[in-house]
Structure formats: structure tokens, C-alpha cells
Image (cartoon, rainbow, N blue to C red):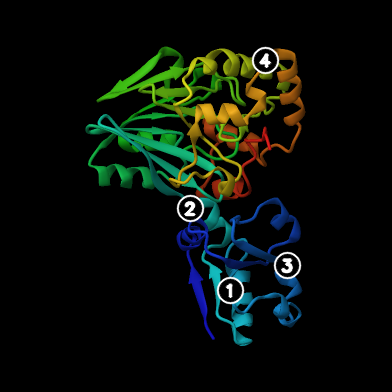
Amino acid sequence: MAVYEMTAEKLNEMIVNKEEFFLFDVRNESDFNDWKIEGEKISYLNVPYFELIDGVEPVLDKIPTDKKVVVVCAKEGSSKMVAEMLSEHGRDVFYLKGGMKAWSEYLYPVIVYEDENMKVYQFIRVGKGCLSYMIVSGNEALIVDPSRFIDVYKDTAKKEGVTITHIVDSHLHADHISGGYELAKQTNAKYYLMKSEGAVFEFEPLENHDRIEFEKVSLEVLAIKTPGHTPGSVSFFVNNKLLFSGDTIFVSGLGRPDLGGKAREWAKDLYDTVYNKVAKIADDVIVLPAHYANFDEEVNERGYIGNLLGNIRAMNEVMQGKNEEEFVEYVAQSASTETPPNFEDIIAINRGVKEATPEQKQELEIGPNRCAVHHTH
């Protein structure tokens, strides 16, 4: 029997297509419980590889013979070893190429919206729960919340035959490293960020712009007015049709305002955002957030993560009928969960006050997204 390599792309395809398969994760139990590959049709077994060094016989009866089996570890080596041991027992087995590190870095594009004025791509970083966007109009493109894997945006722009002219970050990200500054350097695009976020490199302060216009797109900056979980969090309202909500509104909840240690104070700003600013936006506007918590629950039938504002309001009791005191109490309670790992280092890199090698960036980003916590199930 044989051992086969499986790429993150192929694994993601199986999850999106709701294919049944068996995932044998050979990382430590704590790592598995903290962060794993998720999908509606996946069955799991987690046994640390060091328990299998003398052989896989103890787990053979737990591994099905009628399903595709994928072995996963942190970087690939251990899963390949375990897969080879299983194949010696007559099993066809796959191992994930590059391990969870590769899974953390994989992102793929989905077209979320198209009309005569613009075409919008969402880039889903599935192992991390991060979302970024490209708005194409005429010969230009604007990027929203780019990840550090900037080639994917350059490749998509090339395929569309457009030039990237504007790049915006909705806030200073705490769980992943932004590609905004690097992408701007490589494309000569204008890079916009809130001055209040404290970045030390050269950028265009969003405070100076009520809107950004190019080709047939008018992007309204709901700036300083929409804190999510940082004080300079903003949302972008495009052509009165799409709300790029950053970490202010998610498909299944609201952003956590506690990462600066001012949960109650910032929750009041979030209340003002939800009940005064966003309340004026129509129900049929599509909300496109910067993160998601659960792919299976939040991906829609068209394959992207987003929903109509009216649907989000209806599902989200905290967005309706609460006074400021009730809202602040609810948010403060919800916000007491674990913070994103390494978030202080990541923010320092995104601010430009700290340098990091690609390897260090990879290490810092490993793990789940913990920016979306206010769920309403």
C-alpha cells in the first residue's frame, strides 16, 4: 500500500465539497484541542506521535478502512513517519504536506459580488479564520486587510489586468501580520491606516479621508466612529452595497473590545457604532468581515463568508433592543476569554516598531483566530 502527499489546497477542497474523510492528528493533545483542521464531515483521532514510535498497532483498530485517511502534524515530518507505518500495515494513507504550518498559510479566492461597477474577491485564509478582499473596478484594484502572503493579490490583479492602487487596513491586526505596507511598497499603491493606531512607517492617515474614490467605486470610511477591538478600528461602506466591517461586526457576533485592557470603555464606543452608525445602514447591505470563527457555520451557499446586515441583526440579539448599560455588561462578560497568542508582538510588527524574519512571522501566527468572540447561539 502507498503513502500520498496531500496539499492544503486539496484538503480545503475536500472540506468545502463536504467530502467525508478521517483526520489522524499526531500533535500533542493540548495543541490539537487548541487548534485543529475543522470540517463538517471530518472524523478525528488524536494520538501524539511519540506514543507511536514503537509502532501503530495500538491505533489500527481505530482507523477506518473505508474512508480517506489524512495524517497531520505541526510541520509534516511526524505525520509522514506515521503514514509510512500505517502503509506497512496495508493502508492507503495521505499526509498533509507542510503540516499545520502550511494549513495556517493557505488562502484561496472566492468571488463574492459583481455588478457593472465592480467585482469583489474574498480571500479566505481557512486555517486562520482571516478574510481579506480585492475590489476591482475599471483598470484599478483596492485591497482590504491584506495578509502577508501578498503574491496572491498581485497574481489576482494580474489575472484581472488591473493595477493595485489603494490598500486599506481596517485596524491594526492582533492575530496576524498585515501585508499592507509591503504590498504598497511593491505596487506603489497608497496605503491607508488610522493614525491613531500608532504605526511608525509612512502611510496615508484614514482620518484625512471621508471617502476613497477610484474608477466606479466610492468607498466611504466610517472612521474613528466604528471601534471593534482597537480604538482606531474602521469599517468601509462601498457603493452603498457592501460593508467591509473589519472586526466590528462578524457574521455571528461582534468584535471584542478588550485587547487594549479597556473593555468597558471601548464597549461604549462599540454600542454607539452598532446602535447609532450601523443602525442607519439598510438591511440588504452585504456585511463582509475581517474574520470568522467557524467555517461550516458561517460560509454561505455561494461559498463565501458574509451575510445581509438584516440577517445578522435578526440573529444577533445584542444588536437589538439593549440599552447601553446592558450592552456594555454583555460585551465585558463575553470579552473575558483568552486573548490571541503573541498579540503584543504581532501588533508591534504591524506598527512597524519591531522587525521579524519570515520564520518568526510564521511562528507568531500559528494557532486559531481569537478575535471573534461574541457569538449568539
Where's residue 122, x and y in %?
A: 42, 41
Q: In the rendered structure, which amino acid carries the disc numbered 4?
A: Lys
Q: Earlier in the sequence, mark 4 or mark 3?
A: 3
Q: In the rendered structure, which amino acid carries the disc numbered 1?
A: Lys
Front residue (pair 238, 74): 238
Q: What residue is disc 2 on?
A: 106
Residue 203 in sight from this viewpoint: no
Q: Is 233 situated left or right of 139 in this image?
A: right
Q: Earlier in the sequence, mark 1 or mark 4?
A: 1
- Name the mark on residue 67: 1
Q: What residue is disc 3 on?
A: 48
Front residue (pair 172, 24): 24
Q: Mark 1 or 4, which is nearer the eye?
A: 1
* Label 4 SS: helix
* Residue at image point 62% right, 29% down: 255
Q: Mark 1 or 3, which is nearer the eye?
A: 1
Q: CA distance from mark 1 to mark 3?
A: 21 Å
- Name the mark on residue 268: 4
Q: Are marks 1 and 2 in contact (CB under 8 Å)?
A: no
Q: Earlier in the sequence, mark 3 or mark 2?
A: 3
